[in-house]
Image (spheres, grey):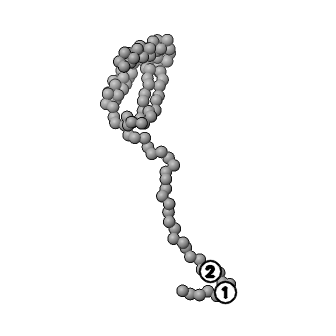
């Protein structure tokens, strides 16, 4: 080892740098849902009816996400077309669906 004279600045050495493990701040992407073919088929059939002018109103509640246990669905709901224009009739349709679902439980 080389000696430096008294009062001379010490030589600069680079310390060995160790990197810490990085923890992501963002949540990982939501689990991938399996394709529900019954949903795809029904939506395609409704789209064909809408394009022919047969479907003129729609009330919907959609659940987007995964069917993995513990995963919370993103819910979207609305009414469009005649269902938006005639809310009394739409409320009757929603009540009928509610009754049917309660009967199936």
In the image, 70 versus 78, the foreground residue is: 70
Q: Write down the residue under mark 2.
A: 10
Residue 57: where, in percent of width, then height? 43, 18
State which quarter of the image contains the N terminus: bottom right
Q: Position of residue 76 (x, y in %)?
A: 47, 28
The crowd level at tag 1 (other Cα within 10 Å; few <14, some 14-19, many 20+) is few
User: What's the CA distance linking mark 1 and mark 2?
Assistant: 10 Å
Q: Which mark is residue 6?
A: 1
Decide: few, some or many residues near mark 2? Use Cα within 10 Å; few <14, some 14-19, many ≥20.
Answer: few
- Can residue 77 be seen in the rendering of this structure? yes
Judged from the image, the secondary structure of the residue bearing numbered disc 1 is loop
What residue is drawn where x is 44% and y is 20%?
59
Q: Does 47 sit above or below residue 32? A: above
* Mark carried by residue 41: none
Quarter of image, res 52? top left
**Secondary structure under the numbered disc 2 in the rendered image:** loop
> Which residue is located at x 35 percent, y 28 percent?
39
Instruction: Name the spot of residue 72 as percent of width and height, x first.
Output: 44, 34
Please determine whether, in this image, residue 3 is positioned above or below residue 22.
below
Residue 52 shows in the view: no
User: In terms of depth relative to the viewer, which is nearer, 105 or 30?
Assistant: 105
> Residue shown at 59%/77% (left/top)?
12
| Residue with the most extreme right position | 7
């Amino acid at each position: 080892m080389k000696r430096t004279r008294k009062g001379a600045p010490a030589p600069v050495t680079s310390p060995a740098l160790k990197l810490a493990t990085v923890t992501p701040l963002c949540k990982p992407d939501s689990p991938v849902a399996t394709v529900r073919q019954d949903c795809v088929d029904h939506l395609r059939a409704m789209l064909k009816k809408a394009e022919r002018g047969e479907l003129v109103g729609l009330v919907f509640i959609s659940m987007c996400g995964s069917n993995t246990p513990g995963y919370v669905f993103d819910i979207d709901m609305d009414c469009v077309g005649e269902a938006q224009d005639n809310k009394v009739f739409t409320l009757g349709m929603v009540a009928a669906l509610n009754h049917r679902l309660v009967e199936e439980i």
